Image (cartoon, rainbow, N blue to C red):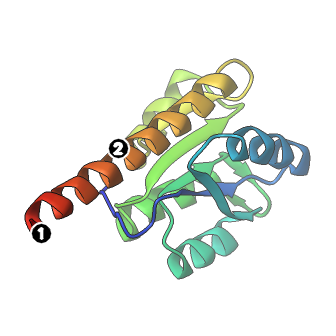
Amino acid sequence: MTCDTSVTALKVFLVEDSIPVRRRMVSLLSAIEGVEIAGEAEEAFAALAAIAAMKIDVAIVDLRLTASTGMEVVAALARLHPEVTTIVLTNHADSSFREACMAAGAHHFFDKTSEFQLARDTIEKLARERAACAVQERGAHHVWRR
């Protein structure tokens, strides 16, 4: 993730076909200071189109989607939007899935059943890093102007 001080909120896009899971994710992530849920999609094509139209910092992707796979999203983001931090959050968490996702370009991989909180903590860490970067950048501009 690069430091863009023109936008202070960490913009997160959810790619998940389960409405209850998306609602839980929105609730958990929206409660983090400095995080904005910028959009949601249930399938790869809609997700990629929306992400291309917005300035997204983080995409959280499930592997099983409506009419597509999350692996398509992970690979396309790595190829077309390498600046987006890609987090896979899935029930398909055995080592072969983890290795395939990381090879396709995912930055993080979490098991929905046991690592939901760890995924949330990772988003919080990214939001804190963005805020610290913005403060540092503002301080550098302030010093430079003297």
- Please give the name of the residue rendered at 41% of the width and 47% of the height, measured from the top-left corner: 131
Cα–Cα gap, marks 1 and 2: 20 Å
Asked if residue 124 lies left or right of residue 44, the reply is: left
Residue 52 at what x, y percent from top left?
A: 51, 77
Label 1: state its secondary structure: helix
Q: Position of residue 63 (x, y in %)?
A: 65, 46
Q: Nearer the viewer, residue 8 or 43?
A: 8
Residue at 27% across, 59% down:
138
Of residue 6 and residue 142, the one placed in the foreground of this image is 142
Question: Which residue is at the far right?
Answer: 20
Q: Circle 1 is placed at which residue position? A: 145
Quarter residue 40 falls in: bottom right
Q: Label 1 amino acid?
A: Arg
Position of 143 with respect to 130 (left or right) is left
Q: Label 2: which residue? A: 132
Badge 1 density bin: few <14, some 14–19, many ≥20, Cα 10 Å: few
Q: Secondary structure at mark 2?
A: helix
In percent of width and height, residue 33 lies at: 60, 43
Task: Between label 1 and label 2, give the one nearer the viewer.
Answer: 1
Confirm whether residue 1 shows in the render. Answer: no
Residue at screen point 30% across, 57% down: 3
- First reached walking from the N terminus: tag 1 or tag 2: 2
Q: Can you say whether 35 is above or below 110 in the image? A: below
Q: Position of residue 12 (x, y in %)?
A: 59, 56
Q: Quadrant of residue 123?
A: top right
Position of residue 106 relative to residue 119, above or below, is below
- Density class for disc 2 (Cα within 10 Å; few <14, some 14-19, many ≥20) is some
Residue in the image at 73% along x and 64% along y: 41
Residue type, label 2: Ala
Q: Are marks 1 and 2 in contact (CB under 8 Å)?
A: no
| Residue 110 appears left or right of 90 | left
Q: Is residue 38 visible?
A: yes
